[in-house]
Amino acid sequence: MEEKQLKVLALNPSTTCNHKCGYCSSRQIFFKDSVVAKMIDFQDAQKLIVEAYQLGIKELLLSGGDPLSHPQIIEIIKYAKKFSGLTIIMNSDIYNLEKQCARDVIDAGLMVWNVSIDSMSNIVNDKLRGRTGALNNAKNTIDILNDLKIKESKNLIVNILTVIN
C-alpha cells in the first residue's frame, strides 16, 4: 500500500473576516456574534509550519477569516519563505486593499493570491458575500495585484476562484 503524504497545510492565521458568507464553514464556527475573533500566535504558526514541512508539505495555504487581518502576517509569510520548495498561497478579499500592503505581502514571499468572486452580478455576489460592494472590492483587489505584476514586475500568480452564478 502506498504511503500517503501531507501536501498542503491550510493555516488560518485569523478568524476575522469582512464578509458574512452564509456558506462559509469557518463563519458557522467562528464568526457568530457571540464568538470573539481569534488570531494564531506567531510562535504557534512557526511550529505548525516546521512540523508540516517535516511531514513533506509542498504548499502553505493561508486562509481564514482573512489572513491580512493578522497583525503579523508579513512575518508569518517571511518565515514560511525560508523553507525550500514551499509554495505560499493566500486566500484574501480584504476590504479596501492598499497597494503598499499588497506590495509588502508579495515582497515577503507570497507566490499565489486567490481572490473569490461568486457572481459577476453585483446583486448576487454581494448577497452571497453578505456585504454591499463585495464584487467591486474583489475587482479592485485584482486590479491592484495585476498593476503590481505589470508595472513593478512582481512575481505573483493571481487566481480568481469562482462558482459564477
Image: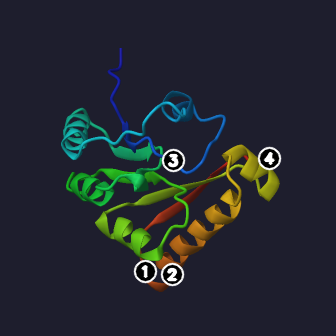
Label 3 element class: loop
Query: Looking at the picture, how far across and down is residue 43, in whole percent?
Result: 18, 43
For the residues labelled 2 and 3, the Cα–Cα distance comes to 29 Å
Q: Which mark is residue 153?
A: 1
Q: Earlier in the sequence, mark 3 or mark 1?
A: 3
Q: Tell me if residue 93 comes above or below residue 107 in the rendering.
A: above
For the residues labelled 3 and 4, the Cα–Cα distance comes to 22 Å
Q: Quadrant of residue 41?
A: top left
Left or right for 162, reference 127: left
Residue of label 3: 17
Q: Nearer the viewer, mark 2 or mark 4?
A: 4
Query: Looking at the picture, how far across and down is residue 69, in whole percent?
Result: 41, 54
Residue of label 4: 165
Viewport quadrant of the N terminus: top left
For the residues labelled 2 and 4, the Cα–Cα distance comes to 30 Å
Image marks 3 and 4: residues in contact by CB distance under 8 Å: no
Query: Looking at the picture, how far across and down is residue 26, in whole percent?
Result: 51, 33
Q: Residues within 10 Å of mark 2 (few under 14, many from 20)?
A: few
Q: Nearer the viewer, mark 2 or mark 3?
A: 3
Image marks 1 and 2: residues in contact by CB distance under 8 Å: yes
Residue at the image position 51 percent from the left and 67 percent from the top: 97
Label 1 element class: loop
Residue of label 2: 150
Q: Nearer the viewer, mark 3 or mark 1?
A: 3
- Name the one closer to the observer, 139 or 113: 139
For the residues labelled 3 and 1, the Cα–Cα distance comes to 29 Å
